[in-house]
Image (cartoon, rainbow, N blue to C red):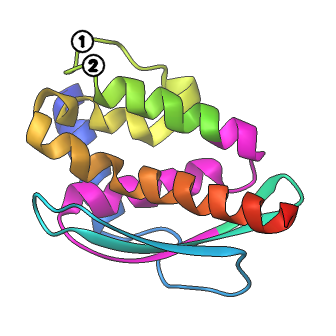
Amino acid sequence: MSVEAMYQEIILDHYKAKHHAGLRDPYEAEVTHVNPSCGDEIMLRVHLDGDTVADVSYDAVGCSISQASTSVMSDLVIGKTVDEGMALAASFSEMMHSRGEIEPDEDVLEDAVAFVGVAKFPARVKCALLGWSAWKDAVAHALAAKES
């Protein structure tokens, strides 16, 4: 099996069996993000325990790429500190904007490396980043609510 076929299989597996899907309580912030170019939509909740991401839950409609990417993202950030999650988001974003030119670190991004092929298709990059953008937004709202 080629690496590309394996990556496609990872994406399809996450799409068929979405991890952390379904909105759950408790949560400190809930956001909705829409990709206007294709209509993909996600409502995402984040629950923080101090500076640790205790839970991410979501309800989404859209393509396999946006939903699988959100599934992978939730696996990666739950249990990490907010700073660690933001570093993962930055690494994923860098990979997605590389047009497939950088070799992602599988030890850091785990299943998210499967999206390196998607980075070659600029129209699909927004799909892959939708859940990540929603997560970063929700964390920002949760942290702001803590401070007020």
- Report if residue 110 is visible in the image: yes
| Left-right relation of 15 to 40 | right
Magenta part, dominant SS? helix
| Left-right relation of 122 to 6 | left
Query: Quarter holding the C terminus?
Result: bottom right
Asked if residue 145 lies in the magenta stretch, the reply is no
Instruction: Give the x, y percent position of residue 122.
Output: 12, 34
Q: CA distance from mark 2 to mark 1?
A: 5 Å
Asked if residue 60 lies in the magenta stretch, the reply is yes
**In the image, which disc is placed on residue 98?**
2
What element does badge 1 sit on?
loop
Is mark 2 in CB contact (under 8 Å) with mark 1?
Answer: yes
**Residue at 19% across / 36% down in the picture?**
118
Instruction: Give the x, y percent position of residue 25.
Output: 69, 87
Instruction: Give the x, y percent position of residue 42.
Output: 36, 72
Q: Is residue 116 above or below residue 16?
A: above
**Residue at 49% across / 72% down in the picture?**
31
- Classify mark 2: residues with Cα within 10 Å, few (<14), some (14-19) or many (20+): some
Q: Magenta stretch?
A: 56-85
Residue for badge 1: 101
Q: Is residue 128 above or below residue 40?
A: above
Residue type beneath disc 2: Ser
Instruction: Give the x, y percent position of residue 90.
Output: 51, 31
